[in-house]
Image: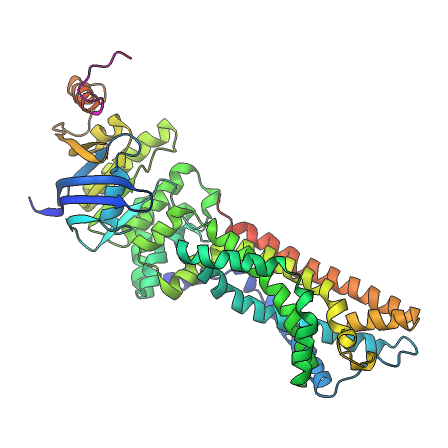
Amino acid sequence: MTKIIEFKDVSRIYKTAKVTAIAGVNFEVNAGEFFGLIGPSGCGKSTILRLIGGIEDSSSGTIEKPKEVSMVFQSGALLPWMTVEENVSLVNRVKGLPAREIEQQTTKYLQMADLEAFRFRYPRELSGGQRQRVGIARALAVEPKVLLLDEPFSALDPLTTDELHEYLLKIWQETGKTIVMVSHSIEEAIFLSDRIVVMKQGSIKEIVEVDLKRPRNDESKEFLKLFDKVKLILEGNQPSFA
Amino acid sequence: MAIRHYHHHYHFSYLTSKKRHFSSVLIVIAVLTLILLALFNFVTPQNTLNLKQLSPTIILLASFNTLFRLLISYVFALILSIPIALLITKTERMERILLPISDIVQSVPILAFFPIVVLVFIKLHATEGAVIFILFMAMLLNLVFSMIGGLKTIPKDILDAAKIFEIKGFKKLRYVTIPAIFPYIITGSLLAWAQGWSLLIVAEALHSYIPNATVGNDPLGLGSLLVNSFYQGQNSVFLGALITMIILITIINFFVWQKLLHLAERFKFD
């Protein structure tokens, strides 16, 4: 397997706030892998995503990553004054691609996201799940090598979340993209990922292999066993009495 | 065919019908006439010295002049306010230095500068410039502060998205920043025009700021007409100017600001 992302002893310190977001982080992501990042709020998982995305720069260490990276945001981050089509095609228009190519890319990913019927609608006319699918279509339309997802389903209801999990897996299998997803849900991370980085207080506690066949059953014994394992790491190997 | 269809939808569809095109041609002609008439007046200025009776020509010319002054001031203020607001909010450091300065400038009444401004422009033989400058300053501050408010409320995710998708420089301004602050530009513009109308009465009646000057030195406009007809006891002229001003403000509010405020709704983040 070829690695596509590598973090070597990476730290990120916010000087003005005097906060160390992550310290001495090392990991590799393989090409085509579904890679999960999990941990409590403020553990630095989103910082890792922002470093891969180039939104922030590391304070020390080295990061190897491809240039073609795109991201799906928790809020969707769609532009309310643009239609679904305009949102999805925006980046390619800004890049100045030929009209025919923009049209092809836009249609391809709108179809994949099952959004053809909503092409000329505005984001406010869509449901939360549909908006998130527009966000995914927009991210894919730039043909990235790595797709970053920052808690994309945390604001959605459970039914929509299940539907979008299936959709995301379908896209991942069809396109073969590398996906790095931040989540605060252990079930979600196990359901989707090949490997999960479990983080706490700015450092990696453990990288857990999810050796379960897809489609995964979140009520199976193996699933629940893995769930307990991740939970135990998050709780600091202390048995929970809650 | 598919491509044509695709591009067709890129433009606001309400601009494409023939009726709309026709009405926009009419608006352009009206605005050009207004500008030409006003320019003509600025080359051979009329004063408001002898207002013996209500003349529709004088009222019309005064309206053109006043609208022209407001428009010129607004256009300059709008063009300049964008880079100023962007500069102030560019970095936290810049904001720490520039925001208190503009706060102080804002809290000083703009008319306090007027006598000095008038004297400077009189030296340059450009009384018209004094009126426009004072209107411009008042409008500029309203626009800048509205825009700063808008720039500071753009969601972080949107700015991050622009960064990750490498939308920067002029393209970021065009596709992200300006539309994102569009509702704030409209409310700022509304305030700016309101301020402009209320300052007009002082700004156009500038003879009181010039040593040994008479009303003959005032540039013709609705503001100077109001002030001077009142002091000369020309009640019909005063009433005519007042009604014209109210009608103009109402028309502009109905056909410009209400439409733009409605359009701005589309640009708001949830």
The chief SS type of the magenta part is: loop
Is B22 or A52 nearer to us in this picture?
A52
- Residue B21: x percent and y percent? 59, 69
Q: Residue at x 78, y 78 (%)?
A: B218
Q: Residue furthest bottom?
A: B44
Q: Can I make out residue A36 in this image?
A: yes
The answer to whether residue B227 is magenta is: no
Nearest the eye: A120 or A133: A133
Q: Residue sitting at 60 percent across and 55 percent down?
A: B187
Q: Is residue A204 above or below residue B260?
A: above
- The answer to whether residue A124 is left or right of residue A94 is right
- What kind of colouring is applied to the model shown? rainbow
- Evaluate whether residue B5 shows in this view: no
Camera-side residue: A113 or B65?
A: B65
Quadrant in which the N terminus of chain A is drawn: top left
- For the C terminus of chain A, which image quadrant? top left
Tell how many labels. 0
User: In the image, B119: left or right of A63?
Assistant: right
Figure quadrant of residue A184: top left
Q: Is residue B49 above or below residue B245?
A: below
Q: Position of residue A83 (x, y in %)?
A: 44, 52
In this picture, which residue range is highlighted in magenta?
Answer: A234-241
Image position of B32 (left or right of B92): right
Outermost residue toward the left in this view: A1
Q: Which residue shows up at 73% across the image and 68% down it?
A: B200
- Residue A238 within the segment the image draws in magenta: yes
**Measured from the top left, where is residue B25 in percent x and y?**
62, 73
The image shows residue B200, relative to residue A130, as above or below, that is: below
